[in-house]
Image (cartoon, helix red, strand yellow):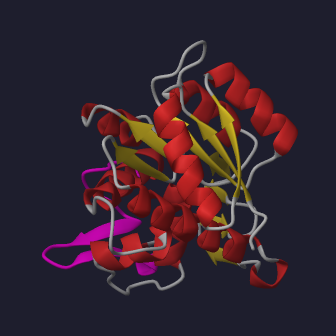
Amino acid sequence: MSQEKILIVEDEKEIALLIRDYLVKEGFEVIIASDGEEGLALYRRERPLLVVLDIMLPKLDGMEVCRIIRSNSTIPILMLSAKKSDVDKILGLGLGADDYMTKPFSPGELVARVKAQIRRYTTLSAPENTRQTLKFPNLEIDGAGYNVQLDGKTIELSAKEFEILYCLAQHPGQVFTREQIFDHVWGYDDYGDINTVTVHIRRIREKMEQNPSKPVFLKTVWGVGYKFDGASL
């Protein structure tokens, strides 16, 4: 039985208990908070391996809780929302959430996503899998430290933005489809919105490119996908 600890921050008691029951059946240890402040307190005290976080919370909303957790931790965060429009906020604001689901959702699908995120996080965190630093003429990508230096300046990328960049930069010139990127970075290919790849690519370009509409680093190969063009650096 796994002893991995999961924090659920959800003010709708029935939903929180439903998620808890499904996760406990899979061997997880589960703790529950009913508002944002309590969620942060439990996160700091219990140090969970993953957080299931609702957007609409009393006292402190889920987006702010996500920002605070992400400012000092790379643990997976799966966000829940009752409104599809909130998905655009999660992606557009670059909160650093690893995944999202809209209510109502399948508890079985949620469990599958939780397992995928934990599997991916523990694999990347293992010492033997520490990644190397990729160096280009004016760009340095530190795989272990999640740090990007462009022309000597630090580029602030979210965890998922960094992983997309690192994945492509490991294979300069190789074209990856959106499906391949999604599977590599999010850790599964059966669930989720593939358009999130396009959104993340756009955000990387906005942060790194002098002219995002004419990218130098991450180029679009129309009808196929994306590639990192190391030859142009």
Q: Is residue 215 magenta?
A: yes
Relative to 156, 215 lies left or right: left
Toward the viewer: 102 or 170?
Answer: 102
Residue 198 lies, with reference to residue 140, above or below; the image says: above
**Horizontal placement of 19 versus 33: left or right?**
left
Q: Nearer the viewer, residue 26 or 193?
A: 26
Which sits in the foreground, 88 or 207?
88
Residue drawn at point x = 30 percent, y = 43 percent: 104
Q: Residue furthest left?
A: 223
Q: Quadrant of the N terminus?
A: bottom right
Q: Residue at x 66, y 41 (%)?
A: 70
- Name the residue at 57% across, 52% down: 21
Residue farthest toward the right in the current orientation of the protein: 45
Residue 158 visible here: no
Q: Is residue 67 left or right of residue 97?
A: right
Give the percent coordinates (x, y) of residue 89: 36, 33
Residue 29, percent across and down? 73, 55
Percent x, y for residue 185?
48, 69
Q: Which residues are magenta?
A: 209-231
Is residue 93 found inside the magenta-colored segment of the image? Answer: no
Q: Is residue 152 left or right of residue 202?
A: right
Q: Residue at x 48, y 42 (%)?
A: 79
